[in-house]
Image (tube, rainbow, N blue to C red):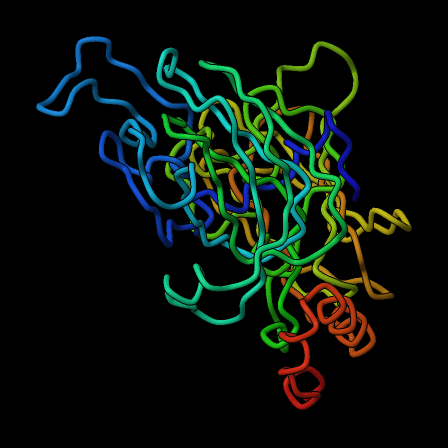
Amino acid sequence: MTAHPAEFRTLADLASRALGGSVAWYNDDFFASAHNLINAGPAASDPAAFDARGKIYDGWETRRRRPPETGPPSDEVILRLAAPGIVRGVLIDTSHFTGNFPPYASVEGAALLGYPSAEQLRATSWTPLLAKCELAGDTENSFAIFAADRLSSHVRLRIYPDGGVARFRVHGEPVGDPRFLGGRVDLAATLNGGRITGCSNWFYSAPSNVLAPGRSSVMSDGWENARRRDDGNDWIEVGLAGAGTLHSVVIDTSRFVGNAPAAAMLSDADTGEQLLPRTRLTPDTEHVFKIGSSTPVRRVRLDVYPDGGISRLRVLGELTAEARAELSRRWLSLLPDEVAAGIGDDELFD
């Protein structure tokens, strides 16, 4: 799924702490912690909140730079993405920063396997994703990324010359690591390369939430549509990590008590083959159903009747040998040449 400027925010936020992202390094956060950047939900503001260092902000704020200084004229933070992926857009949110926001920012990406140290990250080669661009204060600054398709496991946000950013969202297409996709796995999980490819309505919360790890903690950590006032029903489509033979599906309505769907149906989104017939659902419950298909499935469609929210969707199955080989070739092609050269065939095609 290629994201156009108005569409990339439907993709998962790969930097989100809720998904598994983390802060790997930053050069300064004197006024407010860089770890706030990847918190779920919008930034809060209390006009009366002050401490010994000044105004307390729910975001990342660096100290004022004073010339003459050595080093680059910018502050920076490096994030580890929850899942490596192709970055399609970023959101640099300066909410509540009015006279102290950075006037400019840039974003770069890098692909490193394993768990590199902060020193290794700082020394690696970075690929530009977003050239230095102008920011507005107290605004969700939204930028589509049109760089060549490359895998990013880490991103670096630079602000010029200093200031505060409330949230930093990195929306993209996750690409599953084929070395860890043998046997039965959740083929819909974001961390394995699953992604939302279509949605009828996401008025209250994003459909990408349903592919996140773990159980939901609040209702907004799921997919909830608006109340329908017609004869239709709502639905989402999910691209799986690759074509697979399916075993079971989990449809979790946890946290949805008075607004869960009355029923659901799962089908092959490409052929229309019914995988789970229309089945009654219970509010605030994790449902597990056996499913199967006559041929391998690449995408599934979940219809809910007539509307309502679900917190998680799991599609358990096994990649076909052909799909795993296809995924391996694509994964290698998206890595930097020097990284791909270190991957043995025995790791990919065992």
Nearer-the-camera pick, 339 or 219: 339
User: Residue placed at 59% from the left, 41% from the top?
Assistant: 12
Q: Is residue 54 left or right of residue 245?
A: left
| Side of 262 where 21 appears, left or right | left
In the picture, measured across the screen, residue 231 lies left or right of residue 34, that is right
| Closer to us: 226 or 31 | 31
Q: Residue at x 56, y 41 (%)?
A: 107
| Picture layout, residue 165 above or below residue 285 | above
Quadrant in which residue 63 is drawn: top left
Pick the quarter of the image with the C terminus.
bottom right
Which x, y percent locates residue 178? 66, 72
Asked where in the image residue 31 lies, by quadrant, the reply is top left
Q: Position of residue 128 (x, y in %)?
A: 63, 47
Q: Is residue 321 left or right of residue 92?
A: right
In the rendered image, which quarter contains the N terminus? top right
Q: Is residue 255 above or below residue 117?
A: above
Task: Look at the picture and state if 37 lies above or below 121.
Answer: above
Q: Position of residue 171 (x, y in %)?
A: 60, 40
The mark tally for this picture is 0
Above or below for 204 versus 170 = above
Q: Give the image location of residue 34, x and y in percent.
A: 33, 39
Q: Residue at x 61, y 19 (%)?
A: 203
Residue extending furthest toward the left = 52
Name the residue nearer the viewer: 208 or 47: 47
Residue found at x 53% / y 70%: 113
View extreme (front): residue: 68
